[in-house]
Amino acid sequence: MPLLWAGLAVSWEVAVEPKLKLWVEKDGLLVFSEYRAKLLDHIAKTGSIRGGAERMGLSYRRAWGKIKEIERNLGVRLVESEAGGPGGGQTRLTPDGEKLLARYRAFRAAAEADVAQDFTQVFGKGE
């Protein structure tokens, strides 16, 4: 049985919802996105660039390159590493890295809430 959605007979039985691709640019350069936020989050959780890279299915070189690209484009250091001893080294987010990640997450959550509200206003909830 078709679902009446936005005044249209929609022939699927699943709820529809908006999705959002969001990124931040500076002078036309992509400087931050969900992909980059996930990389920083994984680095913070694992304590290493290699661990963060593995969780995302990236090579260490690719992950390190992404970090350096973000740092270069924003002009701030995002990670700091300590050389390892017997147990290995550790990488953590700098205070600027933590602040960037937290602010991006808050911005993304606010944008998603606004889009969901606007979507419902324009298309309705479905009948």
Image (cartoon, rainbow, N blue to C red):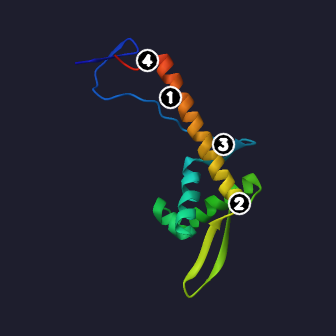
> Foreground mark, 4 or 3?
4
Q: CA distance from mark 3 to mark 1?
A: 20 Å
Q: First in sequence: mark 1 or mark 4?
A: 1
Spatial CA distance of label 2 from label 1 is 32 Å
Amino acid type at image mark 2? Pro
Residue tagged 2: 95
**Mark 4 sits on what residue?**
124
* 103 lies above or below 118: below
- SS class, disc 2: helix
| Residue denoted by label 3 | 24
Q: Nearer the viewer, residue 117 or 77?
A: 117
Asked where in the image residue 48 lies, by quadrant, the reply is bottom right
Q: Quadrant of residue 114?
A: top right
Few, some or many residues within 10 Å of mark 2 (<14, 14–19, 20+): few
Q: CA distance from mark 1 to mark 4?
A: 11 Å
Q: Earlier in the sequence, mark 4 or mark 3?
A: 3
Hey, what amino acid is under mark 1? Ala
Looking at the image, tell me whether mark 2 or mark 4 is earlier in sequence order. 2
- Tags 3 and 1 touching, CB below 8 Å: no
Q: Earlier in the sequence, mark 2 or mark 1?
A: 2
**Which mark is in front, 2 or 3?**
2
| Quadrant (top left, top right, bottom left, bottom right) of the N terminus | top left
Q: Nearer the viewer, mark 3 or mark 1?
A: 1
Residue at image point 56% right, 69% down: 47
For disc 1, the marked residue is 116
Mark 2 vs 3: CB contact within 8 A: no
